[in-house]
Image (spheres, rainbow, N blue to C red):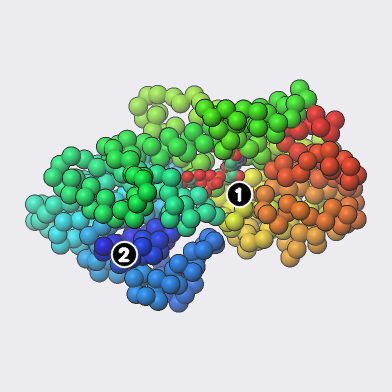
Amino acid sequence: MKITIIGTGYVGLVTGACLAELGNDVFCLDVDQRKIDLLNNGGIPIHEPGLEEVVARNRASGRLQFSTDVAASVAHGQLQFIAVGTPPDEDGSADLQYVLAAARNIGRHMDGYKVIVDKSTVPVGTADRVAAAVREELRARGEESMEFAVVSNPEFLKEGAAVDDFMRPDRIVIGHDDSPAGQRARDLMKLLYAPFNRNHERVYWMDVRSAEFTKYAANAMLATRISFMNELANLADQVGADIEAVRHGIGSDPRIGHSFLYAGAGYGGSCFPKDVQALERTARQYDQELLILRAVEAVNDRQKQVLGRKVVRRFGDDLTGMTFAVWGLAFKPNTDDMREAPSRVLLKELIERGASVAVHDPVAMEEAQRVLALDLSEAQLARVDFKKTPMEALDGAEALVIVTEWKAFRSPDFEQIKARLKHPVIIDGRNLFEPPLMTGLGIEYHGIGRSVLTGK
Ligand code: UDX
């Protein structure tokens, strides 16, 4: 099928590359000439496992093209995916200006029936606004009878596993209306996703508003599970219970399940914080308050401070002259994404209390330098030492703080850690190690919600 993807950010690029991989003829459009040049020269603007190969292969076969030419892009695809950003407004609601601009471009240049697919995470009701924008442009051209349909097909990709998630989806949610144009859109979407339905049907068909809502509901539910466990972990620390044992104990109930019950340093990234806020904002527009989600957000804000609190409890309020080693900067492993990363809250706190930090991340160091320059003053940034290897970060540091659970941090040489640190102290925001083993190795270990096992 002929497909146009508007917006070659994270979702757009993965969607375009993966749809080309399935044999479709894909045209990716972006307003950012530098990004398009980079992609046309074989580069990749984001770090995502497997993506580079898929892009290269399909570019070489001619099935994947990148362009800034709006008219040519709209002319290309019968299916027009809108995958542009929806950054939060000042008040937390999703900013739809890029989505609506994409819709207008489609209306301005379309020359026959098109299916407009909302891929960006957008508030309930956005499809209607997209349709209105397209219709307005068609009317301005005197082409109001030209048919089109807007469907909602939200994205559930996880960063770091996006290609795999796309190629082997748990479910595909598609919302369409029952008009003749909507029915025709359903048939085309069915054809597009047929390769995923060979073993069993993975598409959930529904009305457009429910599809839009499903995306927010999924992320809000996952964020709720995390905040719930983080809150219980803090209590476990107090009452002398082990949150990891509790996690196993409750997760084995199939009604609860094991996923997304890991206590840690708080959730970050481009989706959970933004989507929880946007859903709260939508509720407020209808004079409702989502009390659970307000608490989910508040617990997460507090949880991002948990590592800083543990450092202060161990080393005091005034950290002047001390250095701390920090492993992991990205909001989670296998990505260089620093958006809403808990490491940013930790570094700011340590530095404001007078400390210096020696940091290492396997892929996010460049991106970290960029965002930390926004978070910190120049003088503060000078106290962040970016180290090439995790071990180098330890030299002369008071303690090691682990923020991201990269695989490379899971089996370190503990003797070296002890030898390089001033004190054999690990503060672990991701519960990577077993406290009794650490005690056996002579390491003072502080996990999240596990103090019963270390007596701290
Ligand atoms: C998420 C959703 O999983 C995905 O379906 C949606 O499309 C976009 O948002 P992503 O933001 O890439 O994906 O990351 P995810 O792996 O879901 O993790 C989100 C955050 O939650 C991370 O900061 C992670 O560290 C944290 N997390 C996750 C926990 O703290 N505990 C857990 O048990 C799981």
Q: Position of residue 49 (x, y in %)?
A: 54, 61
In the rendered image, which quarter contains the N terminus? bottom left
Q: Nearer the viewer, residue 78 or 317?
A: 78
At label 1, counting other C-alpha atoms closer than 10 Å, the crowd grade (few under 14, some 14-19, many 20 or more) is: many
Q: Nearer the viewer, mark 1 or mark 2?
A: 2
Residue at horizontal 45%, vertical 72%? Answer: 56
Look at the picture and state if 139 lies above or below 76.
above
Marked residue nearer the N-terminal end (1 or 2) = 2
Q: Position of residue 322 (x, y in %)?
A: 85, 50
Q: Quadrant of ligand 1?
A: top right
Label 1's element? Answer: loop
Q: Amino acid at mark 1?
A: Phe
Label 2's element? Answer: loop
The residue singled out by tag 1 in the image is 331
Q: Is residue 67 visible from the viewing direction of this image?
A: no
Q: Nearer the viewer, residue 274 or 183?
A: 183
Q: In which image quadrant can residue 215 be found?
A: top left
- Determine whether the beta carbon of the residue marked 2 sits less than 8 angstroms from the nearest atom of ligand 1: no
Residue 24, disc: 2
Residue at horizontal 83%, vertical 56%? Answer: 413
Q: Position of residue 31 (x, y in %)?
A: 37, 64
In the rendered image, which quarter contains the C terminus? top right
Residue at horizontal 33%, vertical 59%? Answer: 6
Look at the picture and state if 256 lies above or below 32.
above
- Determine whether the beta carbon of the residue marked 1 sits less than 8 angstroms from the nearest atom of ligand 1: yes
Q: Nearer the viewer, residue 169 or 254?
A: 254
